[in-house]
Amino acid sequence: MPKRVAVLLLVFAIIFAPKVAGKCTSDQKEVIAYNCALYIYRPRPGGAPETWSLCCKKVREVMQVTDMECIVQLLTPKEQAFYGKRFRDLELICAIRPTHPHS
């Protein structure tokens, strides 16, 4: 019985594991920083990119292989303090939301 429990736990862990174990590149960070610069480096709140924008397209491409927290970890401590939240927010801002069927 304990072996079955261990096997089930292992299967569960594999199926529901995070999509990334900290593997991201500075190239991925630069792609997001370059394409989303108008939002990330904006001096005031606001100016979020549209989901159809090139910024969001690039964010979604990167998010297929890693997560934004990994990208934020590539920033310097000073960059994290100033821009970390904006990088993290892009993951939510750029998500494609399901559309509701018309009634």
Image (cartoon, helix red, strand yellow):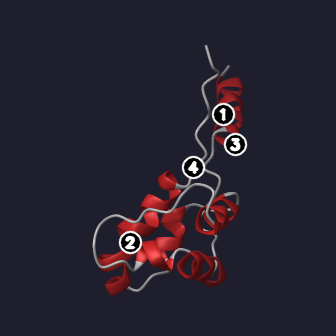
Of the pair 7 and 42, the residue shown nearer to us: 42
Work out how far the residue at label 3 is from the one at label 1, CA to CA, in angstroms: 5 Å
Please, what is the three-letter code of the amino acid marked with disc 4? Ala
Give the mark nearest the N terminus, 2 or 4. 2
Q: How many marks?
A: 4
Q: Give the residue pinned by disc 2.
A: 84
Please, what is the three-letter code of the amino acid marked with disc 2? Gly
- Tell me where residue 56 appears, x and y as whole percent: 60, 62
Give the mark nearest the N terminus, 1 or 4. 1
Can you tell which mark lies on residue 12?
Answer: 1
Work out how far the residue at label 3 is from the one at label 4, CA to CA, in angstroms: 24 Å
Q: Give the residue pinned by disc 3.
A: 14
Q: Quadrant of the N terminus?
A: top right
Q: Give the residue pinned by disc 4.
A: 95
Secondary-structure class at tag 3: helix
Seen at 45% across and 82% down, the residue is 75
Secondary-structure class at tag 1: helix
Which one is in front in this view, the residue at disc 3 or the one at disc 2? 2
Query: In the rendered structure, are the residues bearing label 3 and label 1 in contact, judged by CB atoms less than 8 Å apart?
Result: yes
